[in-house]
Image (tube, rainbow, N blue to C red):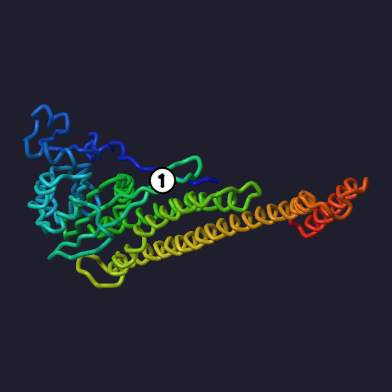
Amino acid sequence: MTHRPVIRRPGDRQAGPDGSRRPTGRQWRRGGKWHSLDDAAAGGVPEQRRCTADVVVDCAVYDEGNRVASLPPAEALEEARRQGGFVWIGLHQPEQEHLAEIAEAFGLHPLAVEDAVQAHQRPKLERYGDTLFLVLKTIVFVEHEKLTATSEVVDTGEVMIFLGKDFVVVVRHGSAPGLSRVRRALEARPEMLRHGPATVLHAIADQVVDDYLDVADAVELDVDALESDVFSAAHGDDAERIYQLKRELIEFKHAVVPMARPLQRLSEDPDPLVTPEIARYFRDVADHLSHVKERLVAYSELVDGLLAANLSQLAVQQNVDMRRISAAAAIMAIPTMIAGFYGMNFRHMPELGWSFGYPLMVGVTSVLSAFCYRAFRRNGWL
């Protein structure tokens, strides 16, 4: 059965502790009232928050594993520190001025902020003072009916995560799937969220790697279909399709392979922001990533083999065609040679004045041509 990964969207609103509708989108609560982008457009919130609200997907404070408040980023950090919890902020494709507001409030390093705005980074893990900065590459499978020489198989996005002792800021770029599903799953497990912001870091990394597995399943279907086409009786020149799939696999590998080192550091190197218990969960994510890498290596080798097999089939077909042409030329050479002899303008030639000379030459030509044809057929040249 075909298993295609689905691009996830932000979740529906959920009921808050007081029975009100708690948003998961770009809204916050202030003064007992929920404010949205519509309120910002109408001037109901300050101009500074209106800019930030354009990119904030969700901003919530968590204490003892429970969501206790939804506030603007700066106020959320103050509330989290007051209660001893942490704040989780989700941003989608922020610009420099949007992220600068949050960077100033949370003390994010300018180099990391620049990477988060510009995107196009390799998977990496860096430490800036008391903050960890993790970059993950996301992969989305691009649906298509059949692989062609121009088919796009995978599309990449990026997720950047700033991790502090009382905050986690998540920035998404490109086709990175929404993380509302991760947030809802963690909010349903407060015993996990009690471990702090590192739990969010693990959950996002785990979801990204799980998406890798889904995309690998979908890519395998393309590899199997291409293999069937290459070895089918009516195969053609599939070199361009094979090469296109190989290019897409390389793009997939560029997202997966560099991610091994950051996960290894998170699972093995002691860090005050990642408790030993959460580090054990990262080992499981690293194991799943290794499984994806092994599958990609197998797919790459198989595609290389398909390309070599396709080229070999073309070479064999060309050899067959050349043998047939050579056999036909050899058969045609017999009457050509005999006709050439008797087309010479000599007075004295054998059988030239004999009345049975013409039928004899036709018969000899036919017998020799038939003999060559049978010999070539017996040897498989025709």
Q: Position of residue 56 (x, y in %)?
A: 19, 42
- Report the residue that reaches farthest toward the front: 347
Q: Position of residue 341 (x, y in %)?
A: 78, 53
What is the crowding at mark 1: few (fewer than 14 residues within 10 Å), some, or many (at least 20)? some
Q: Secondary structure at mark 1?
A: loop
Q: Which residue is at a point 37% across and 65% down the rendered structure image?
A: 286
Q: Which residue is mark 1?
A: 152
Q: Is residue 322 left or right of residue 381?
A: left
Q: Which residue is at a point 39% across and 55% down the rendered structure image?
A: 252
**Taking 221 as reference, is 290 above or below it?**
below
How many tags in the picture? 1
365 or 240: nearer the viewer:
365
Q: Is residue 218 left or right of residue 350?
A: left
286 or 147: nearer the viewer:
147
Q: Is residue 208 left or right of residue 333?
A: left
Q: Position of residue 369 (x, y in %)?
A: 82, 52
